[in-house]
Image (tube, helix red, strand yellow):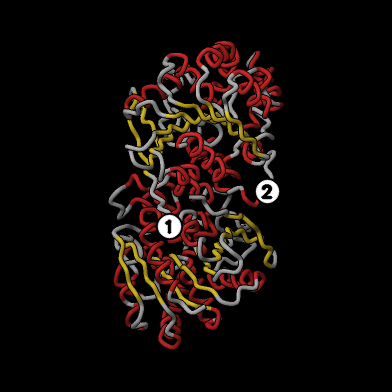
Amino acid sequence: MKKQTIYYKTINVDGINIFYREAGDKTKPQIVLLNGVPNASSAFQELIHDLKEDFYVIAPDFPGFGNSDIPDKNAYAYTFHNISLSMEKFIDQLGLIHPTVYALGYGGPITFRIASRRPELFANYILQNSNAYEEGLGPAMLNAAPFLEKRHEETEKLVKPLLTLDGIKLFFLNGAKDETKINPDGYLNSLFYLSRPGQEEIQLDLLYDYRTNIAEYPNWQKFLKEKQPAILLVWGKNDVFFPLSAAEAIKREVPSAVLHVYDTSHLALEEHHSDIAERIKEFLLK
Amino acid sequence: MKTPTVNYRKEKVADLNIFYREAGSADAPVVLLLHGYPTSSHMFRNLIPILSEKYHVIAPDLPGFGFTDAPNYKEFTYTFDNLTKYIQGFIDQLGLKRFAIYVFDYGAPVGYRLAVANPEKITGIISQNGNAYVEGLSDGWNPIQKYWAEPSEENRNNLRMMVAAGTTQWQYFTGVSDPTLIAPESYSLDQFFLDRDENVELQLDLFKDYASNVALYPTFQQYFRDKQPPFLAAWGNKDPFFLPPGAEAFKRDIPNATVKFFDTGHFALETHVNEIGQEILDFLAKLPK
């Protein structure tokens, strides 16, 4: 019988309680799963079930996300740089040794920032609908471009809808093949967390900071070109944020990367977690 | 191991869209899962993959709960009789002829009403903290019983703390020895639904109508005695609402009933889904088709 045990824990990292999901046996190969908007570590719930017999799996919520603490923005600036520092310390405090990293969405820039500082930390990279190339910016990101260029009341109007139910559904449903396979728990829980007081300001701060990721793209490209890391690309090709062009650009830079394409949305795990889990096992165990 | 596919569907029953989760082969024996307060079929998210390898699992959300329509309390009669009417319609429209039922909390008075009305359809009953005996009611019911005795505005207002976020979380953690087993999306999703516009009012209506369930306990017990349905009670022994004597009592009317206790609280599936899942598989394997 399939066992269902996942543990929901917190660990204090520099005064911030970081929530994380933990499953599997610590002696098995380690995978750390990183995601940001809209659903933090809950994006990985089904994948964790699929992987936990073969791997030790850890999925944290970033500061300000999900069930982690939400530090005051005056004490903790919501930038990708700061979150990458928090996550790097989190990985060290848990004692993970050369884990594989699975980066989805915002998890991509966090991963590339950590890897740029410590190229030896991650043994392998699984990248899903996250980006390091200008050509990988999809229509929803291009729509946000004026906001990323200059943040003010008018440009904020372009991105605030991303935090509404319709915006959240862009991640879950836009480009999905079979809506009856998409668990509605996911997008309503996202709305619950993103509707909390203070979230809008935090999420806009971080989204505005995405411009610093675009500025870093050339450095990450150089990292990929020089290190040629082991990469598995699993991609929802109808993603309006980081479409297939984002995966193809990485594959061009790292020809050994293995690419699996899914006819679905940004949150490809919603429809395809079982198959993606099988691809991960092929990639890491064979 | 591959996770079986779960489909998320809606069935229009009279004027309401009834949301349900469905998994497993359409040819397999059917298991109907009925959730409790204040949750939804979300509570079965981890049980469904365990059962769906061998069974056709169907888990609807009751009217007013989860993803099923929740008409305003002024426009809909929120009674257990009426909830049952919609689930009966749901069963009829899906053409379910024979099935086992899993009942929990509010799912129990709905499920037992269905069993009384359709004894020929029921292959077996799994009651997880699904009460049918007065001795199963804890002191936690006192404020609600006060509202039954005197349905005043003041007594109604006194129950509003029961639908607050703190109480919802308390229900999940009380009696649980390892709190790291409780997934936060359980109580957060419940609260999201409770915090919807005036959902609280319909919940208060149902608190009031719970008296109708207690009034039917003798009818449910008579059904148990007359029909002797195969019965498994899987009970969190530290549930602050439904006490272990409520589980033991089933054996009085159904001597062959199996009663198993688990060291946990009200939402036993949050902490013991593997153990309870195995008990259910063993129980279902022995049922007539």
Residue shown at 44%/81% (left/top)? B229
Question: Which residue is tagged 2?
Answer: A178
Callout 1, which amino acid?
A: Leu
Question: Which residue is tagged 1?
Answer: B159
Question: Can residue B44 be seen in the rendering of this structure?
Answer: yes
Q: Residues within 10 Å of mark 2 (few under 14, many from 20)?
A: few
Q: Which residue occupies the foreground of this view, B251 or A28?
A: A28
Question: Can residue A212 be seen in the rendering of this structure?
Answer: no
Vertical side of B210 occupied by A193: above or below: above
Q: Position of residue A73 (x, y in %)?
A: 46, 21
Q: Position of residue A40 (x, y in %)?
A: 50, 34
Cα distance, mark 1 to mark 2? 41 Å
Does mark 2 fall on the same chain as mark 1?
A: no
Looking at the rendered structure, which numbered label has been put on residue B203? Answer: none
When asked about the image quadrant of residue B240, the answer is: bottom left
Residue shown at 62%/64% (left/top)? B76
Q: Is residue B123 left or right of residue B87?
A: left
Callout 2, which amino acid?
A: Asp
User: SS class of the residue under badge 2?
Assistant: loop
Vertical side of A239 occupied by A85: above or below: above
Residue shown at 38%/66% (left/top)? B279
When asked about the image quadrant of residue A90, the answer is: top left
When asked about the image quadrant of residue A170, the answer is: top right
Q: Which residue occupies the foreground of this view, A134 or B208?
A: A134
Q: Which residue occupies the foreground of this view, A103 or B111?
A: A103
Vertical side of A178 occupied by A148: above or below: above
In the picture, which quadrant includes the N terminus of chain A?
bottom left
Q: Position of residue B113 (x, y in %)?
A: 51, 76
User: SS class of the residue under badge 1?
Assistant: loop
